[in-house]
Image: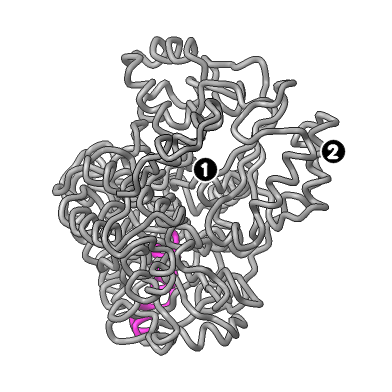
């Protein structure tokens, strides 16, 4: 909604139980109500929550969606992943700015509009896309931007904008066991209650379910460890912070299969003895919040949440939704827990792992959206049914978010073991030259590898599948990814903070035509440093796209090299050009020697 002048700070704090652990949610409401988080608000929050101001300030300054300066009544953020760029995002942003006489990253003179980029908003299948005051608008073109510009000129509140602007279709192109079969709310819970907690855990174990977030840790092992761990309370956390560019399959599950996800969380609660679950929803999925809340309310009315669930005495469990605030690193489970506790989302030192010491330092199961959906299906239909799908090492099905150079971008569900070639045929990628599997932190494969299979034993994936045709410049793809990692590094550890920036700078140097073989070797060296010393997975994988595209598409790099040995990034002689123009000198002594 457009920014308001009045912010009911005591009311917001009271709604979140005056609990500093809910600080991110409190700051989100302040931002939505006031349009900004001014300095004096931090002082008031510190008093209301009885915590030092520095704690409030460190959290408020960490997240990309919080800002102390006004962004006007309408904050426009264009999604800037490589797929958006391929779909013409830059030209459309320029067109939009010209329509409203705007300059990016500057508040308009009338204080009405602010335009900038954001890394990715989970709409790669409907690119280019943007956020308006946190609400997503997909499939941008000039006509849509004209309409948005007119609404802004008329100062229409967002609630009065045409709903069709905010419609986000699932684009489910190939349904499977999770997305294509009917599910009756409560069916999995009834089966789990009839079976008992121990036997339900045994079914999860027999299913060989592995986490769908990318790491592939066995789910039953995590649940069993948490179940055994001692603590004052146990918690269930659903990681719905799918910030990997190109991924949007969790968006589809939450939009149309939320019952399946919430039921999986409730089954988990029954197994580990939890009374509270938390869904951490990425801030870019703000559109889904009210719908998800209504599903929770319906489940409470149906006796599927709350006290004595389905009449089982002592089976008490409920779910809260917490919104993220624009930090990719919060997809890492310990960073996500820090964010849930109202802190900057920086990864923790491990061990201990969350199953022993997680949310509020208590035993916590953290799984992603798709994993909980699978758990519900297993509880309903049994572990043997699930294990029969896929491959011996990768049971079940996998949801894949397909975008880029293909005729039918969208969500596809396959049994594990499907080949890349089959997926490309299904989505109409007739001229595919490369595929980025699992987003920038994943694996880039060339056309020579299209017979590889989607499975933990071959190509593991968190769900992104970005297709690039022969017309695409793979150097620019990798360059976009290096900018992404440099921007999203949380800055906690020096190797990641510095290494990601160095990678970005070298790629920019190559793009400017000033690169050399020395620079390419430097990037390989940085990769080894990052993999060996970075604190978390972001740093470990940040060099993957560069090194893999260097190996598989060397021509994309070599054609940019100015020299084969060394070339400085800074052109000293070129920097003197302004001085030469001012003085009117262009003789030999006004230039630096080449060597």
> Of circles 2 and 1, which is in front?
2
**Helix, strand or loop at mark 2:** helix
**In the rendered image of this protein, does residue 206 appear above or below residue 594?**
below
Residue at (29% x, 49% y) in the render: 595
Say whether residue 568 is left or right of residue 357: right
Residue situated in front as seen by the camera: 566 or 592: 592
Indicate yes or no whether the magenta region holds residue 382.
yes
Residue sitting at x 79%, y 52% = 142
Question: Between residues 61 and 569, which one lies in front from this camera angle?
Answer: 569
Q: Is residue 590 shown in magenta?
A: no
Q: Which mark is residue 150?
A: 2
Spatial CA distance of label 2 from label 1 is 26 Å
User: Magenta region: which residues?
Assistant: 369-387
> Which residue is painted at 60% across and 17% down in the image?
7
> 137 left or right of 149?
left
Q: Residues within 10 Å of mark 1 (few under 14, many from 20)?
A: many
Contact (Cβ within 8 Å) of mark 2 with mark 1: no
Residue 386, how many percent across, how many down?
A: 38, 80
- Point out the tag, 2 or 1, that comes first from the N-terminus: 2
**Residue 255 in the figure: left or right of residue 325:** right
Query: Does residue 288 appear left or right of residue 13 in this picture?
Result: right
Residue 124: percent from left, percent from top: 58, 61
Tell me the SS state at disc 1. Answer: helix
Q: Quadrant of residue 149?
A: top right
Can you tell which quarter of the image residue 21 is in? Answer: top left
């Amino acid at each position: 909604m457009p920014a308001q002048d009045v912010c009911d700070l005591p009311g917001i704090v009271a709604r979140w139980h005056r609990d500093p652990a809910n600080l991110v949610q409190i700051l989100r409401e302040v931002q939505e109500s006031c349009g900004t988080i001014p300095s004096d608000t931090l002082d008031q929050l510190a008093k209301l929550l009885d915590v030092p101001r520095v704690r409030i300030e460190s959290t408020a300054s960490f997240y990309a969606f919080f800002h102390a300066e006004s962004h006007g009544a309408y904050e426009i953020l264009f999604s800037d992943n490589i797929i958006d760029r391929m779909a013409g995002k830059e030209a459309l942003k320029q067109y939009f700015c010209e329509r409203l006489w705007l300059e990016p990253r500057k508040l308009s003179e009338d204080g009405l509009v602010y335009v900038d980029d954001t890394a990715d908003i989970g709409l790669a299948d409907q690119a280019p896309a943007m956020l308006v005051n946190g609400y997503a608008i997909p499939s941008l073109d000039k006509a849509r931007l004209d309409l948005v510009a007119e609404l802004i000129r008329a100062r229409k509140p967002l609630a009065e904008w045409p709903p069709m602007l905010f419609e986000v279709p699932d684009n489910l192109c190939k349904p499977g066991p999770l997305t294509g079969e009917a599910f009756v709310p409560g069916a999995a819970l009834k089966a789990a209650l009839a079976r008992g907690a121990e036997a339900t855990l045994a079914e999860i174990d027999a299913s060989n379910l592995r986490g769908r977030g990318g790491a592939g840790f066995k789910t039953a092992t995590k649940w069993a460890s948490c179940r055994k761990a001692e603590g004052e309370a146990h918690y269930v956390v659903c990681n719905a912070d799918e910030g990997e560019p190109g991924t949007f399959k969790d968006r589809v599950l939450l939009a149309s299969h939320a019952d399946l996800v919430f039921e999986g969380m409730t089954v988990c609660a029954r197994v580990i003895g939890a009374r509270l679950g938390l869904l951490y929803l990425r801030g870019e999925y703000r559109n889904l919040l009210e719908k998800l809340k209504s599903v929770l309310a319906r489940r409470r009315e149906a006796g599927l949440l709350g006290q004595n669930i389905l009449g089982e005495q002592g089976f008490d469990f409920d779910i809260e939704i917490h919104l993220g605030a624009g930090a990719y690193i919060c997809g890492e489970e310990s960073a996500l827990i820090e964010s849930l506790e109202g802190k900057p989302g920086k990864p923790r030192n491990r061990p201990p792992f969350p199953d022993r010491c997680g949310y509020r330092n208590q035993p916590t199961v953290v799984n992603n959206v798709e994993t909980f959906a699978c758990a519900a299906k297993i509880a309903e239909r049994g572990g043997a049914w699930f294990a029969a799908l896929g491959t011996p090492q990768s049971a079940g099905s996998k949801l894949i978010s397909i975008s880029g150079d293909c005729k039918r971008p969208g969500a596809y569900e396959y049994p594990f073991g499907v080949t890349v070639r089959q997926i490309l045929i299904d989505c109409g990628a007739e001229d595919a030259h490369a595929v980025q599997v699992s987003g920038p932190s994943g694996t880039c494969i060339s056309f020579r590898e299209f017979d590889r299979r989607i499975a933990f034993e071959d190509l593991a994936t968190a769900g992104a599948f970005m297709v690039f045709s022969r017309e695409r410049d793979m150097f620019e793809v990798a360059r976009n990814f290096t900018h992404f990692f440099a921007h999203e590094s949380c800055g906690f550890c020096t190797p990641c903070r510095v290494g990601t920036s160095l990678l970005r700078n070298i790629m920019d140097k190559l793009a400017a035509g000033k690169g050399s073989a020395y620079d390419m070797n430097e990037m390989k060296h940085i990769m080894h440093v990052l993999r060996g010393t970075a604190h978390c997975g972001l740093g470990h994988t940040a060099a993957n796209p560069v090194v893999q595209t260097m190996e598989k598409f060397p021509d994309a790099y070599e054609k940019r090299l100015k020299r084969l040995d060394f070339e400085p990034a800074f052109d000293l002689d070129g920097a003197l050009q302004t001085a030469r123009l001012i003085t009117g000198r262009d003789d030999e002594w006004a230039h630096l020697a080449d060597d």
